[in-house]
Structure formats: C-alpha cells, structure tokens
Image (tube, rainbow, N blue to C red):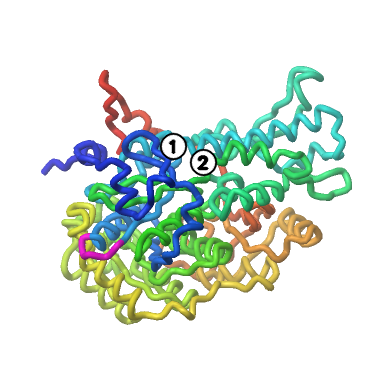
Amino acid sequence: MAYLTDIEIAQSCKMKPITEIAEKAGVGKEYLEPYGWYKAKIDLSYLKKSEKQGKLILVTAITPTPAGEGKTTTTIGLADAMNLCGYNTCVALREPSLGPVFGVKGGAAGGGYAQVVPMEDINLHFTGDFHAIGAANNLLAAMLDNHIQQGNALGIDVKRITWKRCVDMNDRQLRNIVDGLGGRMQGIPREDGFDITVASEIMAVFCLATSVTDLKERLARIVVAYDYSGKPVTCGDIKAQGAMTALLVDAVKPNLVQTLEGTPAFVHGGPFANIAHGCNTVLATKMAMSTADYAITEAGFGADLGAEKFLDIKCRAAGIKPNAVVVVATVRALKMHGGLKKDQLGEENLEALEKGIPNLLRHVSNIKNVYKLPCVVAVNRFPTDTDNEIDFIIAKCKDLGVNTVLSNVWADGGKGGVELAKEVVRLCEEEDNSNFTFSYEDESSIEEKIEAVVTKVYGGDGIEFTTNAKKQLDQLKADGFGNLPVCIAKTQYSFSDDPTKLGAPDNFKVTVRSLKVSAGAGFIVVLTGDIMTMPGLPKSPAAERIDVDENGKITGLF
C-alpha cells in the first residue's frame, strides 16, 4: 500500500486563516501580527494581559535510533486528541533548523496526520527568526574583531577569543578556519570557526529570555573573549547588546500557526538538545499556558538530553514545572537497542525487546524517581508490532507504576491519540507534581552538578576531566561562574558519551573534554566525547531529494 508523504498530506490540508486560530486561542486582534494568511507573531504584551495558567505537559522520548520514535508527531497528535475530547489545548514546539532539513532529516514539523502547517514555511525560512539570530550572533563577531582592529582598547588577547560566527546549515568546512588574511587593513589573522546557529549562545539566550529587557541584559553578559590579564570580556564591554536586541526584537515574539486539525500551535526557537539546551522558548511555552487549559510541549532527543535540560535548566530559569510527562517509544526502536539491525525489525523478537527495553525503563525511572513527576509511556504502534511485544512493554512499565498507552496519531491524527489524551488528563488532574525536584541543587559545585546528571540520569559511574577541562574548570570558578546550571553536550545515541553503547549501559564514565561559560544563557556548556557544535552533511543529503516545480510547489521535503 502506498502512503502519502508528509508534505503531500500537509499540502492537501485546507488551512484556516490565522485570525481564526488566534480567536480560538483567545488572542485578540490587537496582539496579532500576521505574516501572510496562515502564520503570525503574537505581541509580548499579551502575556501581561492574560491571567490564565494552564497545565503543562512535557513530551520526551527514549534514546533515538534510525528506526524513529515520533516525539514531535506524538506531541502534535496528543494536542489534537485532547481538543477532540473537549479539552482546551494548544501546543508549543521548536522551529526546525535548516541544517538537518537539508542534511539528515528532511522536514521536522511532525509526521503523517499529526503535523503543524504550513509545513514548507515552518521547515524553511518561516518568519525569519533563525536568520535574525544568526545576524545578531555575527554582528557581535564583527564588532569584536573591529574593536581589535581599531586599537584594542580592552586589551583582548586574540588567542583567547571564545566567540564564534554561526550559520544555520550543516557545513563541516567551517568548523575550523583561519581568517583576517590579506594584510593590515583586512583584520587580524587568527584561527576561527563557525557553530551551527541552533547551537549558538544567542539561540539559548533567545529561548530563555522572558522579555525584551531580559533579552538585552542576557546579551550584555555574554563572554566573548579574555583580556591579557585573564579577565572575561563581555558583549556589554563591546557595546553590542543594543544593536543585537534591535535585530531580535521582532523575532522574540512567538510564532502562531496551526495543526492539521486546527489546534493553535506556537512554534518558536529551536536549539539542538545534544549540543545546546534543546527546548523551545520560555515565551512560547508561557504563551501556550496563558491561552489554553492544557499546554503540550516537547524537548529534543531522549529524556537524558532534552528532558533533563528542560527540567534542570528551563524550569529552573522560568519558574515552571510539568504536570505530566509523556515518554515516547516504539517497539522497533527498542529492538534496535536490543541489538537488531534496521532490516530485522519486521519480525516478532521478544529476546531483542527484552535486551532493549532497559533503555525505556531507565528514562521512565528518571522522570518518576529522579524528577518525581507523573509519567505515561506512549507507544507509537507500527503494523509489524505484535500483541506479545506490546504486552511485554505494558507489563514492564507497570512494574514501575507507569501506564502504557498505544498511540496511532501518525495514521489517524487526533482520533488515534484519544486513549493517550485521557491518561494525560488523568495524570494532570489526579496525580501530584508538587514533589518535583531537580537532579542537582544550585549550591552544588560544577563537578557535583555534572556528576549528578551522569550518575542519576545517565546511569554512569562518574566523570573524568581532561587536563584542558580541569584548567577551564578552575578559570570558571575564579571568574565567579561556579553557581550556574550545566548544559551537557553529549551524543544523542546513548546514555553514555559513546554512541555505540545502546540500550541502558552501565559501568561507564563520561569524559569532560572542555567547559565554556554561556553567561548570557546562564549555564556552563560541558562538551563530552566527540560531540561537535557544527554538524556535517551525510553522504546523501536530504537536499538532493527536495525540488520545486514551475508553480512553486515544493516536493521531497520529508
């Protein structure tokens, strides 16, 4: 049987005017800034006006595999299902990054009959937010290098510049470069490099800011270099924060679109969860909570990455906490964690499932026992999944005191998520989230915070610092940054820092390769293993399969 592609499903949808979607969300026309017929920005003044405080549901997942898990799809389908059941619900999602869109993934706006639309716009330029973030980032880089060129009054050590340029594209050629060549008037020759936009500190600042004023103050705190005496030099010292805020002042307003079934959707911000903090903006999440009785959001990759950062960083910064957490899994992915290859997943294999299910159970246990939040497992059912395999998962999760619900939102949209919607509402109304706790305390040292995440969340034995990382650790403490949360950059494919260790590995230590302060974002970036902040394109990039016809109709976008 031939299935429609995601983009074909999206293009066949009859979208409602964005004014109708805003009205459904309770957002008055005076707060609406339309970008065409089907997307708009919402003025931040709406947050001051609204007195609603809806319940918050976080969607996360098991450790990702090539078999797929469907986290964004589940998030969207669950929102549609809850509205179908009569519960006033909206959704808050991350914006897709152009790098993966043209690289590994193709589109990232959900899948099947659980998508946000207009799909092509969202996956490409959308409202220009990421371009604004890249421009602000590179303005700071330009002003920093210009300051050095114009006499270097701040005494910046050109060998200790920490600020990188960025571009929203997977481009390994730009990881390490030399610039400023060509003579005295062409700048100061130095080693440099690019990050992908969604791994930049500007993205993290953008996502964690609570107002325009807070945004500007965070930008001013960004550390861009060190002077010859070893003291940090900030964006505020360069006097760039005002102009950068001017570039971001429109972008920081949350974007409103819709699902295929007309559920209001705030799509805003989008850092990678493996190399950045992995959540949509605080402003979009709060706006979702201010427009609906239930707000559903997601965090990137597995719960050890996106959910950990959502709970330990975003919730700490924003003063919010989920009422319930959904952990998404598939039988296929769990069998891959049990050692099967992708072409072996179509047959029942309880032995492989038994070997792989500890991955799911560790994520569930973390949500329930480390963070002490109500939890449900959502299993995206595939036609090849057998009743025996499903029953096995249900029984194992029940042992942890967590219910398992089958989800079929990819094929059936909202009606395929009704049972999941009922369980989520039950958790929100009957279970208690008042015992919510972080995995570490503010007062803990940087080492203690990293070790807490590694031992409590990853299931590791501890941490090891490289010689370089130890020096950076001492510097961070001397500069007064020892009280900040930690944002650990780690492979998404394993609980450990080794992507080949599938399932739920134990008896491992995580190697801390380097540490860097993101003072504007308000956390310490901890690089582990071989993680890089500029991905590359694969052998056959998704861009090869994307095309557009004479009438402007795009094809191949997932």
Q: Hey, which residue is sitting farthest front in the picture? A: 30
Q: Is residue 302 above or below residue 259?
A: below
Q: Position of residue 502 (x, y in %)?
A: 42, 60
Decide whether residue 87 is among the magenta residues.
yes
Which residue is at a point 81% across and 27% down the rendered structure image? 149
Can you tell which quarter of the image residue 51 is in?
bottom left
Q: Position of residue 178 (x, y in %)?
A: 69, 29
Of residue 427 and residue 263, the one placed in the foreground of this image is 263
Please name the residue that numbered disc 2 is placed on.
251
Task: Give, as a single range, the part of the protein colored magenta.
Answer: 84-88
In the rendered structure, which disc, 2 or 1, sits on the residue that comes first in sequence? 1
Which residue is at a point 68% across and 66% down the rendered structure image? 446
Q: Is residue 207 left or right of residue 514?
A: left
Q: How busy is the neighbourhood of tag 2: few (under 14 within 10 Å), some, or many (20 plus)?
A: many
Of residue 505 and residue 471, the one placed in the foreground of this image is 471
Q: Is residue 96 left or right of residue 25?
A: right
Label 2 element class: loop
Label 1 element class: loop
Q: Quadrant of the N terminus?
A: top left
| Residue type marked 1 | Thr
Q: Is residue 286 left or right of residue 551?
A: right
Which residue is at a point 19% across and 59% down the rendered structure image? 416
Please name the residue that numbered disc 1 is placed on.
127
Magenta span: predominant SS is: loop
